[in-house]
Amino acid sequence: MLKQNILEALNAQINLEANSSATYLSMASWCDREGLRGCAAFFYAQSDEERMHMLKIVHYINDMDGHAIIPAVDKPDSVFESIQSVFKMVYDQERAVTESINKLMTLSQEGHDHATTVFLQWYVGEQREEEGLVREILDKIRLIGSGSQSLYYIDKELERINKARAAAAGAADAGWEAKA
Ligand code: OFO
């Protein structure tokens, strides 16, 4: 059974994850229209991941005899200034999510809610990875610069990152199956 303040904070986190998913889907659509296929594929996958983050909390709350509330999402921006500004927005968004997870973690620790603390550990690791990845992309964008073919090279870089992530996910799945 979840304490009321933790239930409310987890439901607020559902809202945050749902809005992240919608924002990344909108970024994917914009990238697609701009011909940035590698960036679009990155954001379509990222949007799915955020939905999965949301679903994990929905299941957790309901498994703990609470009631997960599915929120309406805010309409995200549909037009962006540049791919550079898009990734800066993503970085800010991920940092806000990390802060929210950290607050939730503190709440669960102060409330001696060990089940929620253990549940949230996965999110702590996930946010560290996501922030690190976006920082890496921002560094690459800075190194590529803003020359006439920079968009081409940025998109190629995102394609490379997508392939590496797919391979890592495949290897993790294979390891999981081997253990099963
Ligand atoms: Fe990257 O935001 Fe979910 O947890």
Image (cartoon, rainbow, N blue to C red):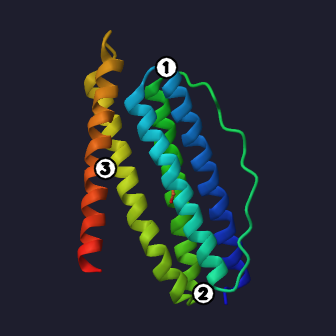
**Above or below: residue 179 compared with residue 58:** below
Residue kind at label 3, given as amino acid type:
Ala
Mark pair 1, 3: CA separation:
23 Å
Which element is circle 3 on? helix
Q: Residue at x 45, y 46 (%)?
A: 45
- Relative placement, left or right, of 59 versus 65 is left
Residue 123 is situated, as x and y percent measured from the top left of the image, at 46, 67
Mark pair 1, 2: CA separation:
48 Å
For the C terminus, the image quarter is bottom left
Mark earlier in primary sequence (1, 3)? 1
Residue kind at label 2, given as amino acid type:
Gly
Residue 175 is situated, as x and y percent measured from the top left of the image, at 24, 70
Instruction: Check if mark 3's residue and mark 2's residue have beta carbons within 8 Å.
Output: no
Q: Nearer the viewer, mark 3 or mark 2?
A: 3
Residue 27 is situated, as x and y percent measured from the top left of the image, at 54, 34
Q: Residue at x 46, y 82 (%)?
A: 118
**Above or below: residue 107 compared with residue 80:** below
Q: Is residue 117 visible?
A: yes
Which element is circle 2 on? loop
Which element is circle 1 on? loop
Residue kind at label 1, given as amino acid type:
Glu
Q: Badge 3, how many Cα within 10 Å: few under 14, some, many 20+?
A: few
**Which disc number belongs to residue 114?**
none
**Which disc number belongs to residue 34?**
1
**Which disc number belongs to residue 166?**
3
Residue position marked by numbered label 2 in the rendering: 111
Q: Residue at x 55, y 69 (%)?
A: 56
Mark earlier in primary sequence (3, 2)? 2
